[in-house]
Image (cartoon, grey):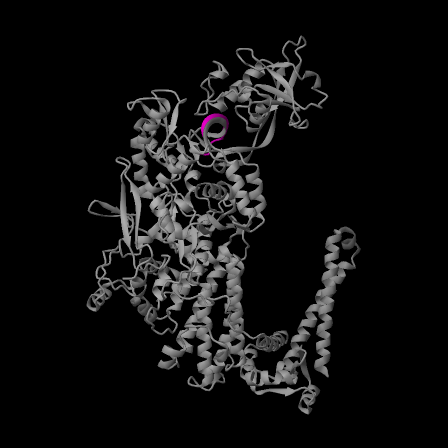
Amino acid sequence: MLQSSQSHHTYNRHRNSRNKSPVKAIITMSSVALCRGLSGSSFMALDRSRSAFFGNKNSRTRKQGNVVFHRPILSMSTSTSSSTSSSSSSTLPKWLNSEYDVSNKSAGIIGKYDPQSFESEIYKWWEDAGCFQPDAKELAQRPFLAKQPYVLPMPPPNVTGRLHMGHAIFVALQDILARFHRMRGRPVLWLPGTDHAGIATQLQVEKILIGEGTTREEVGRDAFLEKVWEYKAEQGGHITRQLRSLGASADWTRERFTMDEDLNEAVVEAFVRMHDKGLVYRGEYMVNWAPLLQTAVSDLEVDYVDEEGKLYYFKYVIEGSSSEEFLPVATTRPETIFGDTAVCVHPEDERYKHLVGQRALVPMAEDGRSVPIIADEYVDMEFGTGALKITPGHDPNDYALGKKFDLPIVNIMNKDGSVNEVAGSRYEGLDRFDARTKLWEDMEENGLAMKVEPHMQRVPRSQRGGEVIEPLVSSQWFVKTQGMADQALDAVSTGDIKIVPSRFEKTWNNWLTDIQDWCVSRQLWWGHRIPVWYVGESGEKDYVVARNEKEARQKAMSEFGHDENVILRQEEDVLDTWFSSGLWPFATTGWPNEDIINDPKSDFNRFYPSTCLETGYDILFFWVARMAMMGLELTGKSPFEVVYLHGLVRAADGTKMSKTKGNVVDPLDTADHYGADSLRYSLVTGVTPGQDVPLNMEKIEANRNFANKLWNCCKFVTDNALKGASETELTQSLPVNEPIAQSEYDTLSLPERYILSKCHKLVSSVTQDMEQYSLGAAGSKVYEFLWDEYADWYIEISKTRLYEGAGGDGPSSDEARAARKVLVYILDTSLRLLHPYMPYVTEHLWHHLPRNSQDGAVNALMLSDWPQMDDDDPLYFNDDDIVSFEAFQSLTKSIRNARAEYNVEQGKKISATIVVSQQYQSMLEPELKSLVALAKLDPENVKVVLAGTDEAKSALDEECVNLVVQDGIEALLPLSGLIDPVKEKKRLERQKDKLSKEIEKLAGRLNSKGFVDKAPEAVVNKAKGELTDLESQLGMVDASLEALAK
């Protein structure tokens, strides 16, 4: 039985929070057997309903014995006997073998495009058939080609999250890349997974506990974590089912979770190694403190909101002044006055120069303490009063200034956002905002308050809890980043990592050049607990960093001289979620397991480094840069070759989507209404990499109409064009197994050669665009070709070959067979090109096209060959044929435009004489029937004549409309055929009468002194412009009447 290079994948899927022992699921797959129809003897029961992936939250978990499997299990024996194979295949569901292909095709393309009727079924077939695994294409079609794998690590969404447009755009873009490179023959690993989302998940569980009348502190850490695991088990599958519904072709057999046991071991190993290198340390620094969550949070988890607040002006009385001289100071947070350790002015500020070096009394301080008055150019003399209170313990800028002047750091805040004993007995225990109100009232009573003004300010709020973030100095664990940042800078500057679009390299360089040490500790319970053990019953001075408690005990004994019974207390904090996410590309492939690293055939050595990391530009620093730093530091390699950045999905007017604004577009509702393909295509086309995407329903609806157009094109080909095809054609000549070569191309007529040349050039252009990550441009080109060239031109021309009534010689004629061949070839090629963008509708339609049955052929479009597999062997095209047919198109458009200009009735056929130079005569004469069909000409009164001949001169002497199409082509349309002179005269006279009345009325207004003098100049000028237009129209009508009178 053929198997992938790593036939058995063993993953830890669950950690029981009580005994910490991993439960393992072993999955054995044979991509080739599944995609061609299983030949194994046994197939364990699956949840065969569509809800297994899109609706039933429990369908992803099943128990057998004492093993919990988090996905359906495929178990296949090595038996390949014909009887077993026959028996097995006859009982398998249709999506698992060729029966799906047969049943889909036999049902025909029925009714209108209805994506809901086939999308989920197709996805289930793909996944159950193993089509998403790296070697599915190679094993199914040919021996393994040893091509370089294409690896995409999926940015792990929050495990308990719900799909939003940010997820939808990354699914669309990453799936495009995965499907494209898979079809080009590269083993593709799109590695999916979810993040434990420390803050978000813990917050949700805490809300549940509060609803139950308790708190996490009351239930204790172990019971709380058990509750979180239960919540994760209940809610954790929604996001991955939703990603599937959009068509994500990720290898779900390798799905990971950041709290998997082996990933937890990777996190511990990374922390220990970095600490051993001196890169991890404990220190006191300014952090973003979320009082509601009672934890430090990263900058990414802070939203800055413009809000109207107040600017409070008050007096800082100069110590020892007999005249009670004071410094006027302004602040937005009066409660932090108790943490002030200086007042700062600009050294050139003449108002306050004389006070520098003196001291000022802290308002309302019970101990009457004073602070120094210092000078620094940091102060803006124009803001507020020009005097700045310095609170190093509660403002990041003041913190830096405090370090510069060696000022003491005073913390006035408890972890819950209340003020502490430093504020004095009158304020201790009050919420910070209540303390603000009371303090200001007291300052007013004591004559220290001056005034209050409205003030717009940027308020930092917790992204998760919504509360105002409090900057404060806290003891935390930090990672030294400068050395690692230098490596990441070098990786981009040397080209080891390429950022698309390149303009973000500047952002990368700025961030990593000015980088600060990274606070990695979080005061949470849910997450990777920091592997630090404090030695002894109390205190945090002595500690060891170890992989487990056993190792910690050994280190405590060797480093501090304790015996084996020494008390060890593990650090309560957990690591920042971004720390574990920073290991994602290499930890998910087996790092740091030495057996895996030393195995040349392991996933680590095959799939690391990754090829492309696709993500939003908004987390370029918070995630991408940290992955680069940690990958380079821990593995010695850049974790990815390319960083592809997409923009943010915004509302139609370009503003940020917001529930409060009511402009949020739900991706699931949108996909349900318009189809996943239409949503995907709308998100990725019409924009360039890194550009924000304004999304509106009109665009999505237009792309649904495009899918419907594709549907109708395929219906025409299968239900009409192929009706007259012989069995030999359907099984031998029509199936597309390779590109049409020049030898066959040269036997075809001009329209066929044209559409093939345009198609082959399209293949080359789209392939190049996609290889260079111009995904939006590539997708738009396929749309334009299918709609503007194939549907609007070639399908219409093909009817003149297929149908006798349209000028054809019958379905068995050579030209009919050639038309069928080209119709199928172009449609098949177009479906392959469009498949990465619109996987569902293209897969569904492709099964209805002729294909012969070959040993090893795969019955899935997603595993078929890309139209151009070898860039060194481009598909044949001829530019001369394109130029010639474009002349035919120009002629057709000119006649159509003349019909519209002269209001020729829709169904009326007109006469025409086409005067051409010799180079176009041989081109146009064979295609007269096509011109007749497309321009609605009278076939009995159409001819092509050579320029300069008597026949051409005679035609020019008649009353006709002369259309000069281009050099060498003219069209002469007899005027009598375009219009009925009597009817046209009456129509023109009516139009003249109407225009004359409008001119008279408007001229009267403009001749009125009252209007001209009183009306605004813009209104008068507009009226004059309208009069000029009307007079011009009247002149054209008069000229037409004169021509009719001749």
Camera-side residue of 43 and 873: 873
Is residue 720 toward the left or the right of residue 351 in the image? left
Q: Is residue 312 visible?
A: no
Q: Quadrant of residue 364?
A: top right
Residue 272 lies, in percent from the top left, at 40, 34
Q: Nearer the viewer, residue 838 or 560?
A: 560
Label total for image: 0
In depth, the one of 271 and 707 nearer the eye is: 271
Q: Position of residue 757 (x, y in %)?
A: 53, 73
Residue at the image position 47 percent from the left and 22 percent from the top: 413
Closest to the observer: 229 or 930?
229
Residue 869 in the image, given as x and y percentages of width and height? 46, 66
Indicate the quadrant containing the N terminus: top left, top right, bottom left or bottom right. bottom left
Compared across the picture, whether 964 is left or right of 413 comes to right
> Measuring 72% from the left and 80% from the top, which residue is drawn there?
1043
Q: Is residue 467 magenta?
A: yes
Query: Is residue 852 in view?
Result: yes
Question: Quadrant of residue 372 in the image?
Answer: top right
Residue 568 in picture, x, y percent from top left: 33, 25
From the viewer's perspective, tell me whether residue 814 is left or right of residue 9: right
The image quadrant where one finds the C terminus is bottom right
385 lies above or below 954? above
Per the picture, the main secondary structure of the magenta-coloured stretch is strand
Q: Please identify the residue farthest to the top as the structure is shown.
A: 322
Point out the stretch of residues depicted in magenta: 465-477
The question of residue 334 being in magenta is answered with no
